[in-house]
Structure formats: C-alpha cells, structure tokens
Image: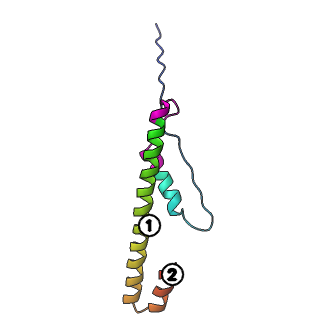
Amino acid sequence: MTFFSAVESNTSPVNIVTSNNGGLDLEQIAELAVDKIVYVSDYAPAPIQEQAHAFRKNVKSVLMFYLNMSAEQERATICNKIRDAGQSSLADLIAKI
C-alpha cells in the first residue's frame, strides 16, 4: 500500500539582488532584510495583508535608520584610524563619501 501526502508550504520567495560598480546600497540591504522578517502570504485575508504591509513598511523604515547610522559610524571610525595614521587629507576625502 502506498500513501501520498500533499503539503502546501507558504515560504517566502528567494530574492537575488545584483549591483554594478560596487556593493549593495542600504536600500537594497533593508529590502532583503525586511523580506526575511515580514512575509505576507497571498492567501491571507485582505485585512491581515494590509496590516502586514503596514508593519513591513515600518520595519523597513527602522532598518533604514539603523543601517544609515551604522554606515556613518563605520565611516567615522575608518576616518579616525586613517587620521591617526597621519593621513588627514585621505580621511577628509573618505568623510565626504
């Protein structure tokens, strides 16, 4: 006797993101993160979908704030280390990025 089991899975889709002439920007990174944090099923009732989309927007906003802060702090740390190494003009150029 053979038994078959049908399983429906609502997993989030796989995202592939590429960039030209550099790494991913902060917006792309936030989008990748929020896609993993908040998944909205196409089969969810409309009110649930609306609430999930609103939550997703808020999560992305928070991620963007902290990703920007992280980039600024990392750049400041790099500039300070370069200044400490005696390369003030290089540090000034990096700070303007």
Residue 16 among magenta residues = no
Q: Which three-letter amino acid code belongs to the residue tagged 2?
A: Lys
> Secondary structure under badge 2?
loop
Query: Is 91 in front, or is 62?
Result: 62
Residue at image location 53% in from the left, 33% down from the top: 42
> Secondary structure under badge 1?
helix
Number of residue marks: 2
Q: Which three-letter amino acid code belongs to the residue tagged 1?
A: Asn
Res 39 seen here = no
- Mark with earlier residue (2, 1): 1
- Residue 51 image offset from top left, x and y in percent: 44, 40
Bin the neighbour count of mark 1 within 10 Å (Cα to Cα): few under 14, some 14-19, many 20 and up: few
Figure check: 78 above or below 53: below
Instruction: Read off the magenta span.
Output: 34-48
Residue 58: give its label: none
Colouring chosen for the image of the structure: rainbow
Query: Is 58 in front, or is 89?
Result: 58
Figure check: 63 above or below 43: below
Q: CA distance from mark 2 to mark 1?
A: 15 Å
- Residue 75 image offset from top left, x and y in percent: 43, 76
Residue at image location 62% in from the left, 68% down from the top: 21
Figure check: 48 above or below 20: above
Bin the neighbour count of mark 2 within 10 Å (Cα to Cα): few under 14, some 14-19, many 20 and up: few
Which residue extends farthest top? 1
* Residue pointed to by mark 2: 96
Residue 68: give its label: 1
- Residue 54 image offset from top left, x and y in percent: 46, 45
Residue at image location 44% in from the left, 56% down from the top: 61
Query: Is 36 in front, or is 1?
Result: 36
Res 20 seen here = yes
